[in-house]
Amino acid sequence: MDLHTHTVFSDGIGNIRDNIAEAERKGLKIVGISDHVHFFTPHLLNSYLSLIGQAKKESETIVLAGVEANILPEGVDISYDFRKKLDYVIASVHLYLEPGRHDEYLELIKLAIQDENVDIIGHFGNVFPYIGYPSMEEYKEIVDLAAEYGKAFEISSRYRVPELDFIKLCIKRGVKLTFASDAHQPRDVGSISWSLKAFKKAGGRKEDLLFSELL
Ligand SMILES: [Zn+2]
Ligand SMILES: [Zn+2]
């Protein structure tokens, strides 16, 4: 599966059909389209959903409609009106944080975990090389909260995160995982080999994946 791909509906360069064609070519079981939510007006979201809906009927790969929302200090920027039309929502931190402020980052992640419009936390920890790494205790707190709220984490091949120890913790506590290329061009759709390798290394099995019932 690849649940994180962008198209011309946000900052990607391919159209929805191109992404799906590449997913079919690479033999994916599931492909998700997940454009950045702040590019959408209600009208644009409807065009997006109707194109994805059409593709769902025609494709041999299962196509899911998602978005990638932003985790902001005041909350995740997606409304229930948008959320209810989608198969899933990824929430990611795209803010600049000062070096040393990984605690601030973790507070944002906790906010998103507790948000009922969110399903998956995107590229968790891609900024740790700049802001500093949390302790194992802090990782445990995050994973426990995700288990309590039924949230998943993606394993991002683009950013090569989360760390192996974090993925192992997710598996141990029953927190679901997804694979994510974060492709911004069609040829990168399905480039999830790092995700797959990390997942296997951490001892993941099919049932540890979100949407495993579709696989
Ligand atoms: Zn992102
Ligand atoms: Zn993205």
Image: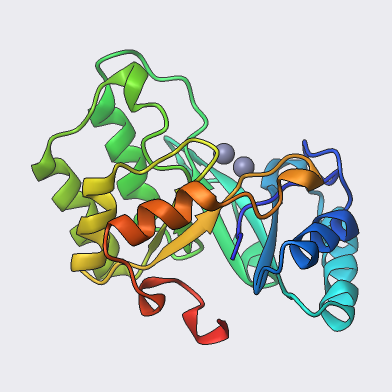
Residue 192 placed where, x, y %? Answer: 56, 52
Q: Is residue 40 above or below residue 210?
A: above
Q: Residue at x 62, y 44 (%)?
A: 182
Residue 79 placed where, x, y %? Answer: 61, 58
Residue 70 placed where, x, y %? Answer: 55, 41
Q: Is residue 127 above or below residue 190?
A: above
Q: Residue at x 15, y 51 (%)?
A: 140
Q: Residue at x 77, y 42 (%)?
A: 39
The C terminus is located in which quarter? bottom right
Residue nearest the viewer, comparing 76 with 193 = 193
- Point out the residue furthest to the bottom here: 213
Q: Is residue 94 above or below residue 153?
A: above
Residue nearest the viewer, comparing 43 with 33 = 33
Do we see residue 121 in this rendering? no
The image quadrant that residue 33 belongs to is bottom right
Q: Residue at x 87, y 73 (%)?
A: 55
